[in-house]
């Protein structure tokens, strides 16, 4: 394996998987997760971020040669678990979990921090070579462009619709668990009893976007997240403009 300097990325910062999803639970009162969430919030509960198995073994490497940008996959050695992983993650999240509705569903610390959160990191982060710092960075990333790639639903025969209990955004193909194929989806707003938004089953990826979800669900409860996103876009635009200006030839 080449050094991190040769590849252009530090292994701890760029173990990009084929599939990665930022997953949110909704207060739908239909399964264990949605029932637990409904006891805590009327909007949403942050569950976790999940990675595919490829997260530990592949990374993408960009290179430039003869003016052309090349993208290649490169085998890397997975990061091994460290005895300090739990403490490192706890130190990062113990004063911030409530800012993201990132609750523990474990009876030992229900509605607070941090048993469920750390257990999920061990299952979906550490075992795939993801460090606590990178896991927390990805958990708190609401600025990067993502698309719908996970749905967990329960079919309701009374309304002939699939009720969404969990939804995820990231990269990779859409993974649908539960529900009945061909039936439209209902996403609960508020407490899952009074208001639903319907999405057509054949085009839900195009309609249920990360931006829509942030604006209509996440930021209803945590408005600072959308405010930070606006600031992020403003800074990115300013940076691009500066780069464009710096590339102009002065005659």
Image (tube, rainbow, N blue to C red):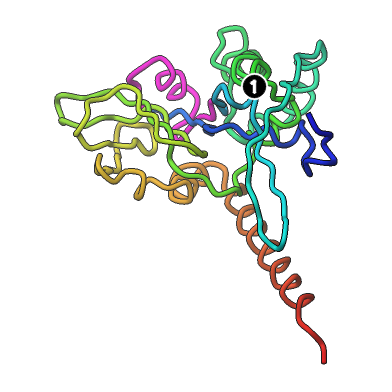
Query: Which contiguous range is marked in magenta?
Result: 28-47
Identify which residue is drawn at 46% across, 28% down. 25
Q: Position of residue 88 (x, y in %)?
A: 80, 22
Residue furthest top in the image:
108
Identify which residue is drawn at 82% across, 36% down. 4
Q: Position of residue 19 (x, y in %)?
A: 52, 32
* Quarter of the N terminus within the rendering: top right
Q: Position of residue 197 (x, y in %)?
A: 30, 43
- Give the side of residue 136 with respect to residue 88, left or right: left
Q: For residue 189, which quarter of the picture?
A: top left
* Quarter of the C terminus within the rendering: bottom right
Instruction: Assess disc 1: are there few (<14), some (14-19) or many (≥20) residues with their C-alpha within 10 Å of its C-alpha.
Output: many
Residue carrying label 1: 125
Is residue 46 located in the magenta-colored stretch of the structure? yes
Q: Position of residue 108 (x, y in %)?
A: 61, 7
Q: For residue 166, which quarter of the picture?
A: top left
Give whichever of 153, 20 is nearer the camera: 20
Answer above or below: position of 53 versus 241.
above
- Give the side of residue 234 with respect to residue 156, left or right: right
- Give the side of residue 78 with respect to residue 50, left or right: right
Identify which residue is drawn at 76% across, 30% down. 133
Is residue 188 located in the magenta-colored stretch of the structure? no
Give whichever of 82, 104 is nearer the camera: 82
Q: Circle 1 sits in a helix, a strand or a loop, which is it?
A: loop
Identify which residue is drawn at 72% across, 32% down. 134
């Amino acid at each position: 394996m080449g050094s991190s300097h040769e590849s252009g990325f530090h292994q701890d910062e760029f173990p990009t998987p084929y599939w990665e999803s930022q997953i949110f639970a909704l207060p739908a009162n239909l399964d264990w997760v949605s029932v637990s969430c409904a006891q805590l919030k009327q909007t949403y509960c942050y569950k976790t971020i999940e990675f595919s198995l490829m997260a530990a073994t592949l990374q993408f490497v960009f290179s430039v040669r003869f003016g052309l940008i090349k993208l290649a996959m490169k085998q890397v050695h997975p990061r091994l678990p460290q005895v300090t992983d739990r403490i490192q993650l706890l130190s990062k999240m113990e004063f911030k979990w409530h800012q993201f509705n990132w609750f523990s569903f474990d009876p030992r610390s229900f509605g607070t921090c941090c048993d469920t959160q750390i257990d999920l990191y061990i299952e979906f982060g550490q075992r795939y070579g993801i460090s606590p710092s990178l896991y927390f960075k990805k958990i708190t990333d609401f600025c990067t462009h993502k698309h719908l790639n996970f749905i967990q639903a329960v079919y309701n025969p009374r309304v002939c619709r699939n009720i969404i209990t969990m939804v995820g955004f990231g990269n990779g193909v859409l993974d649908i668990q539960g529900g009945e194929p061909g039936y439209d989806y209902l996403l609960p707003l508020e407490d899952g009893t009074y208001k639903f938004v319907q999405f057509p089953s054949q085009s839900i990826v195009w309609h249920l976007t990360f931006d829509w979800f942030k604006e209509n669900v996440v930021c209803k409860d945590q408005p600072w997240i959308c405010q930070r996103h606006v600031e992020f876009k403003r800074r990115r635009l300013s940076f691009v403009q500066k780069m464009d200006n710096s590339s102009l030839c002065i005659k």
